[in-house]
Every structure is written in structure tokens, then in C-alpha cells.
Image (spheres, grey):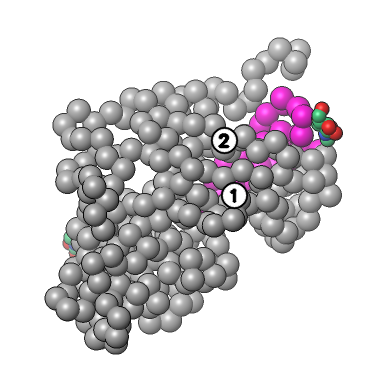
């Protein structure tokens, strides 16, 4: 009987794809470089970001040379925004550089006064050469920012098995080094070479889990936003049968898709 049922995930993935397709933007232009204006401040110590809502732990401080940020709920997106990359620049005359700094979102910012709280390194990184001390003294600045693709040179998307996993009943994984400019909206899991797909659910941030853990080596499918709808990224062999808590496993694939937003203005030419 089970053999003729569709994969467990197909219904939910279908609904998600339909929802994504329905999100059209009739009043604004399609854009992958929507420019937003807000303010940014910074953490004077890095620890708030490493214990952040995304669940990256101390790993976050090694991301992107420590250029990480906490973002407001509309950027955090209940965890789907974890790992997203943004180019942020300030405009204090003479102090701020034109290009600003690219940061990775690793935490939720609950303070509604600024869209971002940056790591001190990222905040200082928005300055012109020699001006980082002056910038840090401002504490809070007006910024423009836009989403940009995440680039992990030479690194594939990876899966870290979390310490809370309990073989064979419970598997929790954290998604690391997520490239492209997308959100992961669903993750399916199955034994290698099998079509017995089950789904994982987002536990929090970048952490997904399931209490229906298939035996043996495991493959993953990632449904990501792409263009105006979705794309399925298939990693055919990720976890070995003898997967262990605390280990990081290379998925063998990387996400390069770009999801469109609808907005005005759009940084058409990618001028900064
Ligand atoms: C920010 O939050 C405070 C306290 O919750 C509230 O009083 C204030 O109106 C909020 N400001 C904005 C711009 O939402
Ligand atoms: C999966 O299929 C490939 C190709 O048929 C085979 O080489 C590999 O050993 C299989 N792996 C498992 C775990 O069954």
C-alpha cells in the first residue's frame, strides 16, 4: 500500500510552490536588488550574535570574516532569513565608503529602532580607510541596504548534525554555507537511492529536524525560492549511515539561485 502513495513531501511542496507562484507584484518592478533605507547600530561585544536566534552558535563568528548581523523580523522571516547576505552602506560624509560591507544574517534583532544590529567588525567595515574609529563613535547611522548573493568560495552547502540528535529516533541538522540569494522553504529527506521521501520541519533558525529518521545513508532535497517561484536542489548523498552528532557533512551541491522581490527603487545597474 505504501508503495503507491506519493512521497510524503509532495503535497506540502506543491502548496508552497503554488503560494510562491501566487506572490506576484503587479504594482512594482521585479528586482533582485531592492534598496531599503533604515538605521544600523552595532554590538560592542560579539557574543549576542554567536548565541543568536539562527542557532549557528560560535560558528557564526567565523562566517564572512565575522561580518555578521542581527536583522528585524521582516528580514529574519521566522528563520528563513538566516544565512541571507546583505550589502549595507552608511552615508556619513567622508566617513562611510561607497560600497559599505556585506554581512550575513545570523540573529534576530528585536529592537525596532534599527533594521540591523551589526557586529562591530561589520559596522567598522562600512568606513572609508582610516575612518573606522570615527564611524564606531557614531554608534547608530542611517544606512541603505540590499540583498546580495552569498558566495562561499570553494564551499558547498553543508549539513551539521546537531548535538540534540538521538539516533535512530531523532535527527536535527543545521544548514551551513547557504549560497545564492534565496530562502529554503522545505527540506525533504530519504535514504540514499530511495524515493521514500519524508519531510523535515524548521525547528528554529537554520535548524531543521525530524523524528522519522530513515535508516542508512541519507539524501536531501531543498526547496528554495527562485525567480518568482521555487527550485528543487537535490543532494543525492549527504549523511553516511554512520552519521555522528557534531559533524559537518558536505552536501556536494551549492545553491546559486536568485529570488526576485518586487520593489521600487531597484538598484538596476548594481552600482554599489
Ligand atoms: C517601537 O517599540 C516601542 C516599544 O514597544 C513602541 O513604543 C514604539 O512605538 C515602536 N516604534 C515603532 C516605529 O514601531
Ligand atoms: C546507489 O546507487 C548507485 C548507482 O546505482 C550505487 O553505485 C550505490 O552503491 C548505491 N548506494 C546505496 C547506498 O545503495
Question: Mark 2: which secondary structure?
Answer: strand
Q: Quadrant of ligand 1?
A: bottom left
**Left or right, 223 with reference to 215:** left
Q: Which residue is mark 1?
A: 157
Q: Nearer the viewer, residue 213 or 84?
A: 84
Residue 29 in the image, given as x and y percentages of width and height: 20, 35
Question: Mark 1: which secondary structure?
Answer: loop
Residue 141, located in which quarter of the rendered image? bottom left
Looking at the image, which residue is at 65% across and 22% down?
Answer: 7
Residue 146 in the image, given as x and y percentages of width and height: 29, 54
Q: Nearer the viewer, residue 196 or 144?
A: 144
Q: How many marks?
A: 2
Mark 2 packing: few (<14 Cα in 10 Å), some, or many (20+)?
some
Q: Does the CB distance between marks 1 and 2 fall below 8 Å?
A: yes
Q: Of callouts 1 and 2, which one flags the residue occurring earlier in the amino acid sequence?
A: 1
Q: Nearer the viewer, residue 94 or 63?
A: 94
Q: Which residue is mark 2?
A: 233
- Looking at the rendered image, the quarter that the N terminus falls into is top right
Q: Is residue 208 magenta?
A: yes
Looking at the image, which residue is at 71% across and 25% down?
Answer: 195
132 vs 151: above or below: below
Looking at the image, which residue is at 74% across and 46% down?
Answer: 239
Q: Is residue 271 magenta?
A: no
Residue 244 in the image, given as x and y percentages of width and height: 78, 55
Looking at the image, can residue 112 be seen? no
Residue 2, located in which quarter of the rendered image? top right
Q: Which residues are magenta?
A: 189-215
Amino acid at each position: 500500500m505504501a508503495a503507491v502513495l506519493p512521497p510524503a513531501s509532495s503535497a506540502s511542496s506543491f502548496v508552497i510552490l503554488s503560494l510562491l507562484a501566487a506572490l506576484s507584484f503587479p504594482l512594482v518592478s521585479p528586482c533582485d536588488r531592492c534598496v531599503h533605507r533604515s538605521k544600523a547600530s552595532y554590538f560592542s561585544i560579539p557574543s549576542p550574535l554567536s548565541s543568536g536566534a539562527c542557532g549557528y552558535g560560535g560558528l557564526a563568528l567565523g562566517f564572512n570574516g565575522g561580518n555578521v548581523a542581527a536583522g528585524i523580523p521582516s528580514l529574519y522571516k521566522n528563520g528563513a532569513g538566516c544565512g541571507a547576505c546583505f550589502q549595507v552602506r552608511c552615508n556619513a560624509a567622508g566617513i562611510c565608503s561607497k560600497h559599505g560591507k556585506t554581512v550575513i544574517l545570523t540573529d534576530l534583532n528585536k529592537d525596532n529602532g534599527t533594521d540591523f544590529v551589526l557586529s562591530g567588525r561589520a559596522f567598522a567595515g562600512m568606513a572609508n580607510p582610516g575612518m573606522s574609529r570615527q564611524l564606531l563613535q557614531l554608534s547608530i547611522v542611517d544606512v541603505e541596504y540590499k540583498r546580495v548573493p552569498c558566495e562561499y568560495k570553494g564551499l558547498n552547502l553543508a549539513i551539521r548534525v546537531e548535538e540534540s540528535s538521538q539516533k535512530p529516533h531523532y535527527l536535527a541538522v543545521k544548514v551551513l554555507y547557504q549560497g545564492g540569494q534565496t530562502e529554503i522553504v522545505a527540506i525533504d529527506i530519504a535514504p540514499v537511492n530511495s524515493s521514500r521521501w519524508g519531510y523535515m520541519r524548521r525547528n528554529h533558525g537554520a535548524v531543521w529536524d525530524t523524528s522519522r529518521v530513515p535508516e542508512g545513508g541519507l539524501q536531501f532535497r531543498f526547496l528554495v525560492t527562485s525567480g518568482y517561484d521555487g527550485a528543487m536542489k537535490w543532494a543525492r548523498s549527504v549523511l553516511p549511515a554512520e552519521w555522528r552528532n557534531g559533524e559537518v557533512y558536505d552536501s556536494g551541491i551549492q545553491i546559486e539561485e536568485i529570488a526576485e522581490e518586487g520593489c521600487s527603487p531597484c538598484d538596476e545597474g548594481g552600482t554599489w
